[in-house]
Amino acid sequence: MINFIFKIIHRLSYKLFNLKALYYSYLFKECGDNFKIWGNCHIKNPDKIKIGNNVSLNDGCYLNGLGEIEIGNNVAISANAIIVSTQLDPNTLRKKTLHINKKIIIKNNIQVGAGAIILSGVEINSNVIIGAGAVVTKDIDGNCIVVGNPAKVLRQLN
C-alpha cells in the first residue's frame, strides 16, 4: 500500500513540473511550444530569455538571462547545466566590481550534457552535442561534438 501511495505522489510531482514550465512560459520574453522542466531549476531574469519549440530543462539547471539568452528549437539541457550571460569585469576588481552582460545564442538541435557550463557572449550553432562537464567559452561551429575545459571539438557530425 505504501509503495502505491509513493508512486502516485511521484506521478503528481511531474504534474507540478508541468505547472512550473507553464508559469515560466509566461515570464520568458518568448516561449515556444512543448517547453518542459523535469525537476527543480533556477532561472534568473526570465524576461530576457527566449525559448524555442521542444526545449527541456532537467534537474538543477541554472539559467541567468541578465545579458539575454536565446535558445532555439529541439534543445535539451541536462542536469546541473549552467548558462550564464553575465560575467565579472576584470578591469574593475580593485575598484568596484562590475559585470559585463553578453548575449548567449544556442541555436537548433543542441544537447547540453550534465554539468556543462556555457558562458556569456557565446554562440552555439545548430546540431551540436556539448559533453558532460564541458566549459564553453567561445563560439562553436555547427555539426560537432565538443568536450573539455575549455570546450574543444572532439569530432564532426555527419
Image (tube, grey):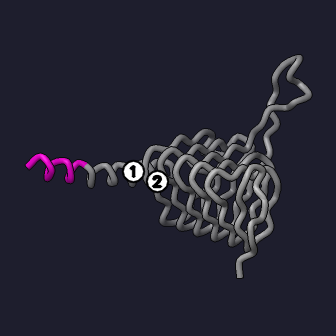
Q: Residue furthest right?
A: 91
Which disc number belongs to residue 142?
none
Residue 22 is left or right of residue 11, and the answer is right
In the picture, the quarter occupied by the C terminus is bottom right
Q: Main secondary structure of the magenta part?
A: helix
Report x, y in % for residue 99: 80, 32
Mark 1, residue position: 17
Residue 66 is left or right of residue 114, and the answer is right
Q: Residue furthest bottom?
A: 158
Position of residue 67 relative to residue 147, above or below, is: above
Q: Given contact means CB atoms under 8 Å apart, are the residues at marks 1 and 2 in contact?
A: yes
Extent of the magenta region: 1-9
Q: Residue at 67% across / 44% down in the picture? A: 65
Position of residue 155 relative to residue 22, above or below, is: below
Mark 2, residue position: 37
Q: Residue at 71% across / 59% down in the picture? A: 147
Position of residue 25 relative to residue 54, above or below, is: above
Q: Secondary structure at mark 1?
A: helix
Report x, y in % for residue 61: 55, 46
Along the polypeptide, which appears first: circle 1 or circle 2? 1
Residue 17 is left or right of residue 44, and the answer is left
Instruction: Give the residue type that dot 1 points to.
Output: Phe
In magenta stretch: residue 133:
no
Q: Residue at 53% across / 40% down in the picture? A: 42
Report x, y in % for residue 15: 32, 53
